[in-house]
Amino acid sequence: MVNEAGLPAVYLRWIPLLPLCAALIHGITLGLLRRPISKPLTNAISCGSVIAAFLISCFAMADLIGEPAGQRRLVDDLYTWIGSGVGGQIFSAEMALVVDPLSAVMILIVTGVGSLIHVYSIGYMEADHRDDKGYQRFFACLNLFTFSMLCLVLGENLVLMFLGWEGVGLCSYLLIGFWYSDRWNAYCGSKAFIVNRIGDFGFLLGIFLIFSALVQVGSPTLSFAGIERSFHQIAGLSLALPLVGEARLVNVAGICFFLGAAGKSAQLPLYVWLPDAMAGPTPVSALIHAATMVTAGVYMVCRLSFLYAEAEVASALIAWIGGLTALFAATIGLVQTDIKKVLAYSTVSQLGYMFLAAGCGAYGAAIFHLGTHAFFKALLFLGSGSVILAMHHEQDIEKMGGLFSRIPVTAWTFLVGVLAIAGTPGLSGFFSKDEILASSFASQVPGHAYLYAIGLATAGLTSFYMFRLFFRTFTGECRASAELQKQIHEPGRSVLVPLLVLAFFSVTAGYMGLPQVWGDLLGIPESNSLGNFLGPVLAQGELHHLEHATEYLLAVAAIAVALLGFGLAYLLYFARPGLADRFADALPAAHRTLSNKYWVDELYDLLIVRPTVFLSDRVCYRILDAGLIDAVAVNGTAHTVRALAAHGLRHLHGGLTQSYVFFMIAGAVAIVGYLLR
Amino acid sequence: MIPLDHVIGLSAVLFSIGLIGVATRRNVIVMLMSIELMLNAVNLAFVGFNRMWPGSDSAPALSGQMFVLMVITVAAAEVAVGLGIVISMFRNRDSVDVDEVSLLKW
Amino acid sequence: METPLLLFYLFAALAVGSALGMVLNLRNTVAGAMNLVLTMVSLGGIYLLLEAYLVAALQIMVYGGAIVVLFLFVVMLLNLRQDDFAPARAWLVRVGSALLAVAALVGLLSATRGLPEAPPVPAGFGGYAQVGEVLYTDYVLLVEVVSLLLLAAIVGALILAKRKID
Amino acid sequence: MPIEVLLKSAFILLVIIGAFAPVITWVERKQSAVMQDRIGANRADVSGITVLGLLHPLADVIKLLTKEDVVPTGANRILHTIAPVIAAVPAIIAYAIIPYGSTYQFGDHALQLVPADPDWGLLYIFAIGSIATYGTVIAGWASNNNWSLLGSLRASAQMISYEVTLGLSVVGCFMVFQTLKLTDMATAQDSTFRLLGFLDVLFGIPVPAWLDWLRLPAWGLFLQPLGFLIFLTCIMAENKRPPFDIPEGESEIIAGYFLEYSGMRFGLFFMAEFIEVVVIAGLLTSIFLGGWAIPFLDQATLTAFFAQGAGPFAGFGDGLANALCMLLHFLCFVVKVVAMIWLQMLIRWTLPRFRYDQVMDLCWKIMLPLSIANIFVTGLVMLVIHG
């Protein structure tokens, strides 16, 4: 148990405050004063604030490591945000920021990757030809997002986390629909927002459930430390549910929280918004929809790991949904032709991996994969953005090809990213994915063998579609139009430097959390430094012990599957380019299903959107609102009063002051008479 | 000792006189003065009742007199605004007869 | 009869007489205002008898010294020599109001019989020190609110009475 | 007890109204003559004896009493008659609370040289001062004369305006002396304070003991200099004498509100004005000049000196010592009052008349903000001193 009070560290507030200040400066100059500030100043403020936040985060990390393992907890309690009482108990939600190993890793990722992407954005948005006026607006939203994400991560309690949770949702909406003049982009933004709201509803329900349970046992609190302390009291409670009957409260709450996580992290069935979110600018896709915001769900599950360790039903559900999402998204990714869509489905799939690990009880593995994924997926997105810039906003890989020699830096770094995500031994993705597969193999979740199989299959598919993407984009003949071909060139330095930095980390990030099994092989004791670092704050799910030999076997299997995927991709898209189409023709039904993404959007449209629209339009609007409330209640009252006044009451209002005095006196006398009766 | 029911009775009498003034006189200024009279009558009642329950040495009760102070202040404000209205009314109508200002009707 | 009681009846008679004088004086607004001053001063005297010293002083200062002077000022500013209005419209309403007022008076008078004897007052009761202390501690919010009201009234009166400069 | 009050009242009325007020008319004539480099009142004589013109007040009275009392046609007879009385009475009864001596112990009996000593002291002055306004206002209105009416309008506006500032200007003194009673104020001023004490209290610089003699009487004048100036200005404006005589304004509206008065009615207005001069001098003395207090010589020291001091005054006994003390105090009071009267005369004959808008601007734009600032500064300083 970590010391709940923690070490006071007043500098923590500046980590979220600096981006907030930057966002406020942008907001005030842009929104209130209507005097946009110059581009260099915008760059300096935005990037400067995030880089400063990153430096402070590093400082906090150093502070944290300086403490002994059990007491790594820094607290900055600003003020009491909500002070109240519940039935004789004091309840307060503090505006407090906490850095413990888990949030320390997260803020480093958020501010580190975030500052790289801010720098990248300078080049990307500079070169963007579409709407120059949005330059500062873009950075305002980006800063606001950084603030919200840090708020989410650093929040000491569920309410503050929820504040950040909603904040990142808002910023995501703003940035997806950044080029709002295109209706499709605005639609995508709304879609993301609405789907997220469904998840948020679940999150809220979870908060309510936990809070009411804690009130029931007499310790109302919403801080994570407080919940963890009182958790043993509510672990045994149960809840009567309609249809299901008695259910354990922790399971229900866990599922509610997971619904929120599924919304934010794009899991089945709420994943549909993420592919469409690619309508936003590419840096946004990299930062929000790959590296940080979408991992908030994973972070939340890990943050509540003490709850999920007790909630076996909820954990199993998470594991299965994660596994299925991973496979499902990977299959869709096989046939997508939009470079960003492929990466989006890959993100959904990788998030599925993380939930698979979390559901299996390997929370450390989930965070590990979260970290490595943040690096290589940000790298891939930024690389795709670089490609898109080079191709003058052409995103279809069918119109690319042969770019390797034209934009070599992008191509090489992209290749590093592909290798990392495909699970090439020695790169970051290999270690984290391997740990997830091993833990799913070792877990006690019902049907864990199938889960392992699904994970393994997904690994192969991942390898296949990523190499497909690489081959189609960078190799072969260039399929772009002739005049476009002449203009293809490498983007500027502010785009390339983040790529190189991220490529470096994509290669090396895996060694932060080198699983012990590989550490033993290499002769490094305590090699899983990330896992050991996170250990005290994460619960440990029950896993079977695996022999080293078994783990090597599993690794070999994973490598084999990845090689298989690579080989297939090489064959279909590099060696024998015509073969892929013949495959597609041979299996028309499968190909149609996959290209249409299993018709999930259409299904949702039919089952949910249309009935809802029908209900709101025909019933709620036309009958209830316009018919009943407007016509009868509002206008009816007015009409009645007007009719009464026009035909009777107005004669009382004769303009003679003293007739009014008369009525007043009569009223007063009546009151006096009543009182004296 | 002054019997308090006489004080309250005097207050009631003055109040009624003021009420009659407001109800019957047409001169706006006299109406305003009658309102002042009514306010004074109420003040008298307040002071009288405060005299009836004056509290103790350790905790004197002065709510009634507080009310009087507030009423005096409010009366001053009321007169300032009321006479301002009277002046602008006289300026527009050349009269201070309430019956003359009857445009606001129906 | 003891002196305070005698004084009380004197002041009461003065107050009622002058109040009637104000309301019933149909011709002369200034005389009405002077009657009102007499009422105010008599009430101030009664406040003294009821041991509300500060209130008595303020009654005379504010009502006598400021409010009625303001009335007189307006009467003179408008140069209203005499009220010579035509017979009133809506006389029925006026008579009705007066009758109702009398009815209310009768009711109130009958209700306020037999109040208890007033107890002796605490030391310093109604003095400026005690009233001031209560006013600026327990009732400080009221003071603030009323001061705001006064400010609003000042601005309002200024706007209303200001001559438009064209 | 009532007899003692009556005696005290009679004494003050005799001294002030019987002696001061008539003499002031003479002083005014003489002083104006001196200031304007002429000879001044010296014509009234009884068989050739002029006594420096001191017979003029007597001649005035005889003239006013024997003149015809005119009530103009169309005037409101009752109000026209009452108005001068309303103007004069408040001025006279204002003396009731001005202490012209301290409290002296004669055996068992404590003699306090003030006719009335109500708890709410100065508020009494303000209350009756506000009643005095009616005299002027009614006089002008009841005369049925447009000039008079204009004078009344000016008077009412001027008087209620300056009343506000007048009240606020002494709040500083209330705060400093912690009382509203004039007797307590005078007693509080019967002491001294270190001239350099502020260094000690405000800045913590200790004042050396050998500078301890550097003292001033704890008079309102020294503690509230700004309050004194504002009070003097406002109360002179209340009195409507030059330079604030716009309600009379001879060159504009002939004689203002008392235009239609003659005989002793006019005399009453005239007298009220001069009585008020004395009242103002008494108030200034009591509030700002220490009243009866002799500077640097407080009552206890003085009485003790007379009772058992050395030299020719040794061993008088308590009774005689108190009596001597009382005499000295009263003389001191009279000297101060005379000085204040002289100051008012000086101002009255030095400054020309203000314009109407200047008078209003002076009140609302200069005096009122200054008096409020004075209260604030006083409060701040007291907060610093008393913590």
Image (spheres, grey):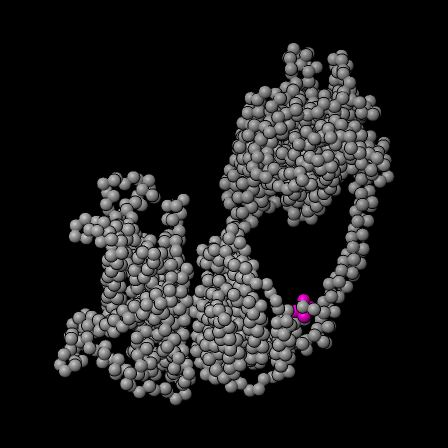
In the rendered image, the quadrant that contains the N terminus of chain A is top right
Which residue occupies 79% across, 47% down?
A609
Q: Position of residue A577 (x, y in %)?
A: 76, 28
Q: Position of residue D52 (x, y in %)?
A: 16, 74
Quadrant hosting residue D138: bottom left
In the rendered image, the quadrant that contains the C terminus of chain A is bottom right
Left or right of D97 on screen, residue D56: left
Which residue occupies 46% across, 79% down?
C30
Q: Residue A214, relative to residue A506: is it above or below? A: below
Left or right of B51 on screen, residue D315: left
- Give the prevailing secondary structure in the magenta stretch: helix
Q: Taking the image as drawn, is residue D43 in sight?
A: yes
Quadrant hosting residue A585: top right
Q: Position of residue A82 (x, y in %)?
A: 62, 41
The one nearer the camera, A631 or B43, is B43
Left or right of A593 on screen, residue A130: left
Quadrant hosting residue D291: bottom left
The one nearer the camera, D218 or B47, is B47
Q: Position of residue A223 (x, y in %)?
A: 65, 34
Q: Residue C3, relative to residue D207: is it above or below? A: below
Does the magenta segment cover residue A301?
no
Q: How many numbered dots are placed on residues in this image? A: 0
Q: Which residues are magenta?
A: A671-675
Q: Residue furthest bottom?
A: D73
Q: Taking the image as drawn, is residue C154 in sight?
A: no
Q: Residue A434, relative to residue A659: is it above or below? A: above
Q: Residue furthest left?
A: D48
Left or right of B51 on screen, residue A247: right
Which residue occupies 52% across, 65% down?
B1
The one nearer the camera, A542 or B8, is B8
Which residue occupies 50% across, 84% down?
C27
